[in-house]
Amino acid sequence: MSAAHDAPREARRVCAANELVEGGAAVRMAAKHCGQDAVVFFIRFGGVAYGYLNRCAHVPMELDWVEGQFFDSSGLYLMCATHGALYAPESGRCVGGPCRGGKLRPVSVEERETLEGRAVFWLPEDALHPAS
């Protein structure tokens, strides 16, 4: 393996921490997953920022029913717009619908203090990283 593959990828700033509103709209980012075009999204739930590959565990389709909208009407679950699969926001585990037993692919997220204030960062990996 080359040294380039051994080195961790640089953290990518996603947004200011206050842009991720509890149970609100997600921030989406273009990504590459195993060399293919993809999208990841970042949400806040229970005061914590989470990130996932935007791909249903049931059928490999994007989840959001309107771009950036992932939460169901209760604000307690992430919902796939195509088949109604429900996922726990804090784990990505399927809790209802046709994906039973499946799980969303998580991305590593960290909140950090910066000179501009608190921000959310994505910690990419070789198999799932920013598109640019």
Image (cartoon, rainbow, N blue to C red):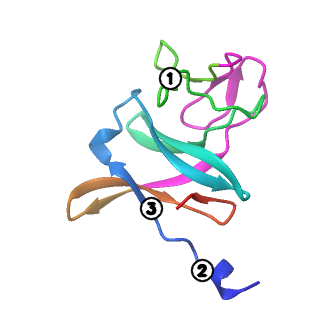
- x%, y% of residue 89? 54, 32
For the residue marked with disc 2, what is the amino acid? Ala
* Highlighted range, magenta: 82-110
Residue 66 tag number: 1
For the residue marked with disc 3, what is the amino acid? Arg
For residue 15: magenta? no
Q: Is residue 31 above or below residue 59?
A: below
Principal SS element in the magenta part?
loop
Residue at screen point 74% across, 33% down: 57
Q: Residues within 10 Å of mark 1 (few under 14, many from 20)?
A: few
The reply to whether dot 2 and dot 3 touch (C-beta < 8 Å) is no
For residue 85: magenta? yes
Q: Is residue 117 above or below residue 92?
A: below
For the residue marked with disc 1, what is the amino acid? Val
Q: Which residue is mark 3?
A: 12
Residue at screen point 37% across, 37% down: 47
Q: Secondary structure at mark 3?
A: strand
- x%, y% of residue 70? 52, 26
Q: Is residue 4 above or below residue 56?
A: below
Whether residue 27 sits left or right of residue 32 in the image: it is: left
Q: CA distance from mark 2 to mark 3?
A: 15 Å
Residue at screen point 27% across, 41% down: 18
Residue at screen point 42% across, 41% down: 48
- x%, y% of residue 4? 64, 82
Whether residue 33 sits left or right of residue 67 in the image: it is: right
Q: CA distance from mark 2 to mark 1?
A: 36 Å
- x%, y% of residue 3? 66, 87
The reply to whether dot 3 and dot 1 touch (C-beta < 8 Å) is no
First in residue order: circle 2 vs circle 1: 2
In the rendered image, the quadrant that contains the N terminus is: bottom right
First in residue order: circle 2 vs circle 3: 2
